[in-house]
Each structure stands twice: as structure tokens, then as C-alpha cells.
């Protein structure tokens, strides 16, 4: 069986294009650009909790990095470097080759260098830390929303949650397994958005974090929330609403912006070929999200996923 060092050399040692020093020493050496702040974020994925045993290794490689890139997007940061902690039950080379392929394919698309990590034997777990750069003082925080701001959402909501319940619906399964991090959108929103967050736990819960951090409320119109056709076709209203409002794992961005930015946001949407939909407004008052239907009647919002909630898987 190949040693830990041979595995690292074989699968995780592609040359780092933009690090002073990458994999192979006791630490990587990184040089941020002048005037940049470092944005740092970590996500831990566990077998049985975040993905099923036997999940496709290439898709896992993609997703492990994608969820981290999404955090960079939500800050308006440009991702640059990543580290990878891996616990593996065995040195399964076919698995490693597939995993590395998925990881590096996405990393290369976004100019991210894998610069280090740790590899050990254990129950399958994947921990990625991402480092990005953002012009000093300009990152998109959760705390910047103000009354009168518009609420926007990118792409579509509910597809990933549908994929979780119905793996046989191909387009939905793809949204769950291979999310597209909205990195270019996040960068484009610098100077435009007042706050942003990515949708990992569900629209209502994640917008709720913006409301808490900003000390404001919001009103959102249910029918304006964008969703894929497979979700729109669902007859049962409650199920449809639950997928759109509380389905997690879509990794779209929810952001707020002043009304005067509407044209700039439309232009950004055109430039990126990514739908950006205005779904509501920020209001003065308690951090409460009101979702209403066309007739301004309240729509019930079920809570999104919480790992520590009673009965969580
Ligand atoms: P140390 O004993 O100093 O922790 P390791 O032997 O664990 O060093 O790792 C050797 C080198 O390989 C280091 O540069 C480390 O960052 C890198 N490395 C280890 N595992 C991974 C991995 N899964 N992905 C990328 N780099 C890794
Ligand atoms: Mg080590």
C-alpha cells in the first residue's frame, strides 16, 4: 500500500501557481496583494451527515471546495488558496483520483491553489479551508442591511432540497451534488450590495442571519422567489413553499442593496448571464422575516436546517 506521503505526492501536489510555497514543506507561504484583507473560511463535511456513504468521489471533491468558494462569494472575496484535511478509511486510489479530479477541476476554474493539508486514517471526513482576498474595508458583511434596501436573490431556490428528496430528478440532483459557487457575482457586488450571505441552510434562515446582524426586518413576496421548473410544478403548496423557503444547499447568494443600485444589478446580471431577482425589501424594526402572498396575506415559514435542533439528523 502506498504511504501517506506517496498519496499526497500523487494526488494533491499539483504546482501552486500563485503561492510563494505550496505543498511539501511544513507550511505553505502566501503573499496577499497589497491593500487586501484575507478572508478565511472552513467547512467540514462528514460522511453520514453531509453526504451519503458511497457518494461519488468526484462530486465530493467538487462540493467540498464549492461550499467554501460560496463563502468567499458571500463576502465578495476572490478565492486564492485552499488547504484540505482528509480522513480516509483506506488508501483507495481510485477514490482519491476521482476526488482530486473534482476538486482540482473547480479549483482551476477559479484560480485557486491547493497549498497544503493533512491526511490521516479514519472515518471519511473532508475539511477544506479557503483563503481569499478582498479590498480592505469593503467585504460584504451580514450587518450592512438598512431599511429601504431591496432584497435580492441569485439563480433559483429549492432545487438542491428537491434533489435530496428525489435523487432520480437529474437536474435537482445536480444542484445538490455540484453546486455552482457564485464567486463572480460576489466580486461584482462589492460597492453595490449592503449585505450578503450564501444560502446553505435555506433562504428564510439565511436571510434571517442578515436581519439579526443588521437589526432590521424584511418583507418578501412568495411568488417572486425564483425556483426551478421542477419545483414550480409541485402541486402541494406547503411542500413547494418549504423547498423554496427552507431548502438548503442551493449556494445562491441573498443580498441587499439600495434602490439606486437596481440598474447596476441588472447590468451585472446580464454580464454574468445569471438571473438576479428582487424579492422584497428591508424594513425598520425587529429582525423578523414576513413572507406574503400576492394578496399580502402571510405565508407560513418553516425553519431551515439546524444541526443541533431537536431531531436533527
Ligand atoms: P506535517 O507532518 O508537517 O503535518 P505532512 O506529512 O502531514 O506534514 O504533510 C506533508 C505536506 O503535504 C505538507 O505540505 C502538507 O500541507 C501537505 N498535505 C498533506 N495532506 C494533504 C492534502 N490532503 N492535500 C494537500 N496537501 C496535503
Ligand atoms: Mg500532517
Image (cartoon, rainbow, N blue to C red):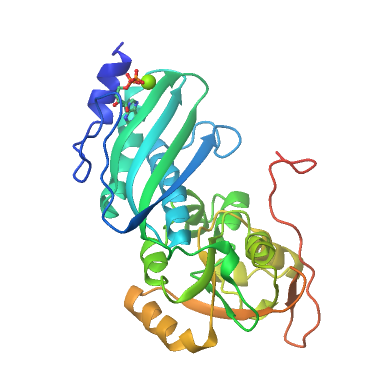
In the image, what residue occupies the spot 60% across and 72% down?
A: 145
The quadrant of the picture showing ligand 2 is top left
Most distant residue in the top direction: 1
Residue 102 shows in this picture: no
Residue 96: x %, y % from top left:
34, 29
Q: Quadrant of the N terminus?
A: top left
Q: In front here: 54 or 51?
A: 51
Nearer to me, 30 or 65: 30
- Place of residue 63 in the rendered image (x, y in percent of width and height, measured from the top left): 44, 46
Q: Quadrant of residue 48?
A: top right
192 to 108, vertically: above or below: below
Q: Is residue 148 above or below residue 96?
A: below
> x, y percentage for residue 64?
44, 42
- Does residue 61 lie above or below 144 as drawn? above
Q: Residue at x 64, y 67 (%)?
A: 214
Quadrant location, the C terminus: top right
Q: Is residue 98 left or right of residue 206?
A: left
Query: Residue placed at 42% from the left, 17% from the top?
Result: 90
Q: Tell me, yes or no, if residue 88 can be seen here.
A: yes
Q: Nearer the viewer, residue 161 or 66?
A: 66
The answer to which of 137 and 193 lies nearer the viewer is 137
Measured as percent of width and height from the top left, residue 18 is found at 21, 46
Q: Quadrant of residue 52?
A: top right
Amino acid at each position: 500500500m502506498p504511504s501517506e506521503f506517496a498519496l499526497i505526492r500523487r494526488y494533491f501536489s499539483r504546482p501552486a501557481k500563485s503561492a510563494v510555497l505550496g505543498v511539501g514543506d511544513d507550511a505553505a507561504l502566501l503573499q496577499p496583494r497589497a491593500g487586501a484583507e484575507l478572508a478565511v473560511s472552513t467547512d467540514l463535511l462528514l460522511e453520514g451527515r453531509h453526504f451519503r456513504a458511497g457518494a461519488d468521489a468526484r462530486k465530493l471533491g467538487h462540493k467540498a471546495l464549492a461550499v467554501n468558494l460560496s463563502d468567499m462569494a458571500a463576502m465578495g472575496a476572490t478565492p486564492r488558496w485552499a488547504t484540505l484535511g482528509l480522513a480516509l478509511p483506506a488508501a483507495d486510489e481510485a477514490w482519491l483520483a476521482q476526488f482530486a479530479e473534482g476538486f482540482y477541476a473547480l479549483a482551476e476554474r477559479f484560480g485557486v491553489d491547493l497549498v497544503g493539508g493533512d491526511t490521516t486514517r479514519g472515518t471519511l471526513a473532508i475539511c477544506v479551508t479557503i483563503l481569499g482576498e478582498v479590498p480592505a474595508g469593503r467585504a460584504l458583511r451580514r450587518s450592512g442591511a438598512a431599511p429601504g434596501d431591496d432584497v435580492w436573490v441569485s439563480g433559483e431556490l429549492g432545487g438542491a432540497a428537491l434533489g435530496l428528496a428525489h435523487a432520480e430528478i437529474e437536474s435537482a440532483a445536480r444542484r445538490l451534488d455540484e453546486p455552482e459557487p457564485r464567486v463572480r457575482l460576489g466580486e461584482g457586488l462589492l460597492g453595490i450590495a449592503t449585505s450578503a450571505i450564501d444560502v446553505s441552510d435555506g433562504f428564510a434562515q439565511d436571510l434571517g442571519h442578515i436581519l439579526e446582524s443588521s437589526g432590521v426586518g424584511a418583507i418578501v413576496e412568495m411568488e417572486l422567489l425564483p425556483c426551478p421548473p421542477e419545483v414550480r410544478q409541485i402541486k402541494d403548496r406547503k411542500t413547494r413553499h418549504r423547498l423554496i423557503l427552507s431548502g438548503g444547499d442551493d449556494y445562491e447568494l441573498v443580498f441587499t442593496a439600495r434602490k439606486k443600485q437596481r440598474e447596476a444589478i441588472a447590468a451585472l446580471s446580464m454580464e454574468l448571464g445569471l438571473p438576479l431577482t428582487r424579492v422584497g425589501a428591508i424594513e425598520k424594526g425587529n429582525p423578523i422575516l414576513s413572507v406574503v402572498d400576492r394578496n399580502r396575506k402571510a405565508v407560513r415559514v418553516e425553519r431551515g436546517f439546524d444541526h443541533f435542533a431537536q431531531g436533527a439528523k
